[in-house]
Each structure stands twice: as C-alpha cells, then as structure tokens.
C-alpha cells in the first residue's frame, strides 16, 4: 500500500491517489470470504464450506470486494497521508475507486488539509508588561478575607438586628389576604444585607428584636419569575427567633498558627505577599503574551478551512463537559437549566476557538521558519511532567500521546517563548 500522487485541486483540498498491491488486496478479499461464506447458499455445499473460487463464479468475482475495500481503506488512506507532505484536518473525505480487481486496488481520496500560512512581523514586537506592586493595603485586605472565613457566629442578646447579622425567622406571605405557594418557611436563616430576598424585605428586618412579631410590606418586581406574583403588593407575617453576628478572630500569632502552617503573623503576611507578587507577575505575563498574540494574529495570512474552527469548538465543548461532570452535571442537564440549544453553546466558544486556531497556525509556521524543535531530553522531561500531573505511569502516557504530537506541541511552546524573548517590553 502506498501513495502514488498528491495533487492540489483547490484551496486546502488535495487529491491523493492511493494504490493497494495485488497481494494485500487478495488477502483482504480472502478475509472477507471467510467472514461472509457462512451467510451464502451454494448448492451441494453446507453453509461455510463452499470454496472461494466457486462462490465467486456463482455470485460474481467482485462479491467480496466491498468488504475488502472497507477493510483496507482506513489504513491505506492513513498511510498515504503520512507519506504526503500534507496534514489533513477533516474526517470528511471524497472517495472514488479508479480500478479494482486481481491486480489490486487504486482509489482517489480528496482531503481537506491545513492551509498555507504567511506570518507578518514576529521579532521586535512591542507590548506592555506592567507588574502591579503589592502594598500593605493589599496584604491587609487578604488578611481581612482570612479573618472573615474564620469568623464564628455568636448570639446577640442586647440589641436589635442590623445589616450583616445572621437572623433566623419564620415568615408567611399573603397577596390580597391569601397565602401563596412557596411563601412560607420556618426557622429560615438569612444574612441581612445579602439581597437574597426581593428589594425592601431585608431592610424591614433591621431594627427588630428577638421574638418580635412584625409585618414586612413589599411589592414583587414586574419581572418576577412567578408570573402570578409579578408586580403585586404582598404582606409577610414574620417572627424573629435568633440574631447572630460574626466575631472575627484576634489578629496575632495564635491566629496565624490556627489558620496556616506558619508560627507568626509576620510569616503569614510575608507568605501572602509572596503569593500576591507571584499572581501579579503571572497576570502581567499573560497580558503581555496576549498583546503579542493579538499582533501575531493580526499579521496572519491564511485561508483557514472551517473544519479547523469546528474541530476546536468540539474540543472546547468536550472540556466544558468534563468541567460539568466534576460538578455532577451533564451537558443535557446544563442546556435544560439554561434554556440554551447546543448551537448556542457552540457559538459561545466560536470567537476564542477561531483565535486559538490562528495562534496555533502562526506559531507552527514560526517554529518551522526558525527551525525550532525540542530536544529528546525536553520531550522526555515533558513526558515525566505529564505523568506526575496525572499520576499515571510515564510509559502509559507515552502509549497514548505520540512523540511526534508532543514534539509539535513543544515546538509551538518554544516558538511562543521565542517571540517573547525577542519582544520589546514597553513601560
């Protein structure tokens, strides 16, 4: 089996003429004969016992050709693509048989391939990279969040409820003096000021004391999700049972020991400063890289087949499905909850998918132009990183990530670094 010719017939379309020799084709026909003989009736023979030559004489010499071709085609086409200089990007193939018989099989397949690419300037690009300094106020804000997460609720006995308190109360709602479905609860917990209830509700709990009974008068919004209540005035009969407030832990070395692996508050703050500096350096690097890639994409010239964009969207949807599964959801449930169609979801990924395809094509071209390739040591190091990341044996990683594919990914990453190393950082 092998490639005879590869001819460009249109933009991003290449016709491959593929040959399967007589020996390989005959072996496939014989395999098809063994697979199907038990289904054929041949006078004078029990099913499955008639010789191939007799079956072909009765049913025609090409009786097993379709099965043989279907068996040979995927491997023959794949090998022909590998032997060509092209990389196909769409599984939809136009197929046509040129000749078939005892002499073998010749077929033509028109495939969609990656486009020819031209890149503009990629050396000496200018982009900003500003790392925001970490201030004492930034560290104090992080400490404040940590205190909030470790606050404890304590009962309030000596004052009425106020914003920020956690209250426990009963309520029942009435419209025109009639109780409505879903408007009643007992021992309901609510943080005042969280805006969990409709506008005006929580404000009327502020100032009330424990065991006090009172009415809350509100009007449902015009766009309220329950149409029967939308825009209507309502009265909620309420009774307040508990008022609790957050008590923040004292800020000292004991606090640092309780909430972290550090022994002192100063050590905790130093660690927070280091983390914030790292995060801001990372954010600045991402912004710098994004600005460079926008310029690279702006200078790209290529007639990109739509199949490449659709393939990238497929990947984005699969990744989204994986994230949903980690939350115990599936794509059908998500679409039902959001009221979206699959086409709408796919369209939401389209802009980023098109940009990612363009970036990848540009970086591949730059890697090719600059002869940027990873060393065997870099490839092995990447395999080990992946094995560690996914907690899988490195040999298993190698079994489903081909070296050629990993090498191409690393070439793209190195091309990106090449662009950044040769860029001018603007202040």
Image (cartoon, helix red, strand yellow):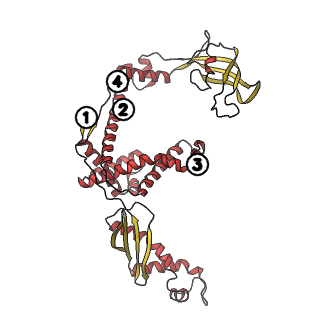
Q: Residue at x 41, y 70 (%)?
A: 109
Judging from the image, what secondary structure is the residue with disc 4 in?
helix
Q: Are marks 2 and 4 in contact (CB under 8 Å)?
A: no
Of the numbered discs 4 and 1, the one sitting upstream in the chain is 4
Camera-nearest label, 1 or 2: 1
Judging from the image, what secondary structure is the residue with disc 2 in?
helix
Label 2: which residue? 279
Q: Is residue 385 left or right of residue 148?
A: left
> Against 275, is 360 above or below?
below
Give the spatial CA distance, label 4 vs label 1. Answer: 30 Å
Q: Position of residue 90 (x, y in %)?
A: 43, 61
**Location of residue 302 by image quarter:** bottom left
Q: Is residue 167 left or right of residue 352?
A: right
> Against 101, is 309 above or below?
above
Q: Quadrant of the N terminus?
A: bottom left
Give the spatial CA distance, label 1 vs label 3. Answer: 47 Å
Q: Residue at x 71, y 33 (%)?
A: 228
* Residue 299 is at least partly visible in this image: yes
Q: Are marks 1 and 2 in contact (CB under 8 Å)?
A: no
Of the numbered discs 2 and 4, the one sitting upstream in the chain is 4
């Amino acid at each position: 089996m092998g490639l005879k010719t590869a001819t460009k017939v249109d933009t991003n379309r290449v016709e491959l003429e593929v040959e399967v020799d007589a020996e390989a084709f005959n072996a496939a026909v014989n395999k098809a004969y063994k697979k199907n003989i038990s289904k054929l009736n041949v006078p004078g023979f029990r099913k499955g016992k008639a010789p191939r030559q007799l079956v072909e004489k009765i049913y025609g010499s090409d009786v097993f050709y379709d099965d043989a071709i279907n068996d040979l085609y995927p491997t023959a086409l794949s090998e022909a693509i590998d032997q060509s200089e092209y990389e196909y990007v769409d599984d939809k193939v136009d197929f046509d048989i040129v000749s078939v018989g005892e002499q073998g099989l010749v077929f033509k397949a028109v495939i969609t391939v990656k486009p020819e690419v031209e890149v503009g300037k990629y050396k000496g690009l200018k982009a900003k990279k500003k790392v925001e300094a970490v201030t004492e106020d930034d560290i104090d804000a992080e400490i404040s969040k940590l205190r909030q997460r470790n606050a404890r609720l304590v009962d309030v006995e000596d004052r009425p409820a106020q914003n920020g308190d956690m209250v426990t109360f009963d309520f029942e709602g009435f419209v025109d003096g009639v109780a409505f479905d879903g408007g009643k609860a007992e021992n309901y917990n609510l943080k005042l000021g969280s805006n969990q209830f409709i506008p005006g509700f929580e404000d009327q709990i502020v100032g009330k004391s424990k065991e006090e009974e009172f009415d809350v008068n509100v009007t449902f919004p015009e766009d309220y999700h329950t149409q029967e209540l939308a825009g209507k005035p309502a009265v909620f009969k309420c009774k307040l049972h508990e008022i609790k407030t957050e008590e923040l832990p004292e800020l000292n070395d004991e606090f640092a020991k309780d909430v972290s692996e550090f022994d002192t508050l100063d050590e905790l703050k130093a660690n927070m400063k280091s983390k914030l500096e790292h995060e801001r350096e990372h954010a600045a690097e991402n912004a710098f890289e994004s600005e460079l890639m926008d310029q690279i994409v702006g200078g790209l010239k290529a007639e990109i087949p739509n199949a490449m964009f659709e393939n990238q969207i497929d990947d984005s949807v699969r990744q989204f499905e994986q994230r949903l599964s980690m939350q115990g959801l599936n794509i059908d449930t998500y679409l039902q909850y959001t009221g979206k169609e699959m086409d709408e979801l796919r369209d939401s990924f389209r802009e980023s998918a098109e940009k990612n395809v363009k970036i990848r094509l540009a970086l591949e071209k730059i890697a090719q132009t600059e002869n940027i390739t990873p060393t065997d040591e870099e490839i092995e190091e990447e395999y080990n990183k992946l094995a560690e990341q996914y907690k899988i044996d490195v040999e298993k990683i190698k079994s489903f990530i081909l070296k050629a594919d990993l090498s191409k990914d690393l070439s793209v990453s190195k091309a990106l670094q090449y662009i950044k190393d040769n860029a001018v950082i603007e202040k």
